[in-house]
Amino acid sequence: MQEIWEQKHIVFFDGECGVCNFWVQWILERDKKNQFMFASLQSDFGQKFLSERKLETKQFNTLYLWKPHQYYLVKSKAVLKIASLLGGIYKTLVIGKLIPTFISDKVYDKISENRMKLSAQKCFLPDQQQKKKFIEV
């Protein structure tokens, strides 16, 4: 299993957030190149990722995108990279790189603060094929 996820981009998300689960499903549906895998920040795998980087392990309001042995990105930088990797029309969102990170992260933080109000807590149930893209589901 390890060699599989080491070749992918891993999206770490809040597994208890309806908005986060919506976006995981959105990425899954558009990941035509099979380049993403997913792990909740609350999972053992997610907690290990956070601990190894001395990141907050009790707050789950930040999205992380990790390419093992290369980089990890947070918040708006992670969102822009995901869009770029999805390609097609989503790649046009790279124009967001023109906005300074401290501003785009402020917008990200504002959405994150209100995410529980934005979406009902819906449990996303992946199909059998999609389940293969989750680490420690």
Image (spheres, rainbow, N blue to C red):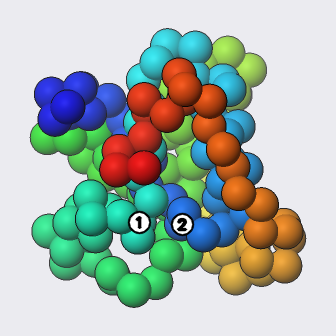
Q: Position of residue 86 (x, y in %)?
A: 58, 24
Q: In which quarter of the image is residue 106?
A: bottom right
Label 1: how many Cα within 10 Å (few below 14, some 14–19, many 20+): many
Q: Mark 1 points at which residue?
A: 41
Whether residue 65 is visible here, answered yes or no, is no
Q: Nearer the viewer, residue 102 or 120?
A: 120
Residue 65: horizontal and vertical position, in percent? 41, 49
Q: Residue at x 57, y 48 (%)?
A: 79
Q: Which amino acid does label 2 sit on?
A: Asp
**Crowd rating for badge 2 (residues with CA inside 10 Å; few <14, some 14–19, many 20+):** many
Residue 32 % position (x, y)? 58, 14
Residue at 53 percent of width and 22 percent of height: 129
Toward the viewer: 28 or 71? 28
Tell me, yes or no, whether the two marked residues, 2 and 1, touch with CB atoms within 8 Å: yes
Decide: is 107 above or below 25: below
Q: In the rendered image, which residue does mark 2 sit on?
A: 14
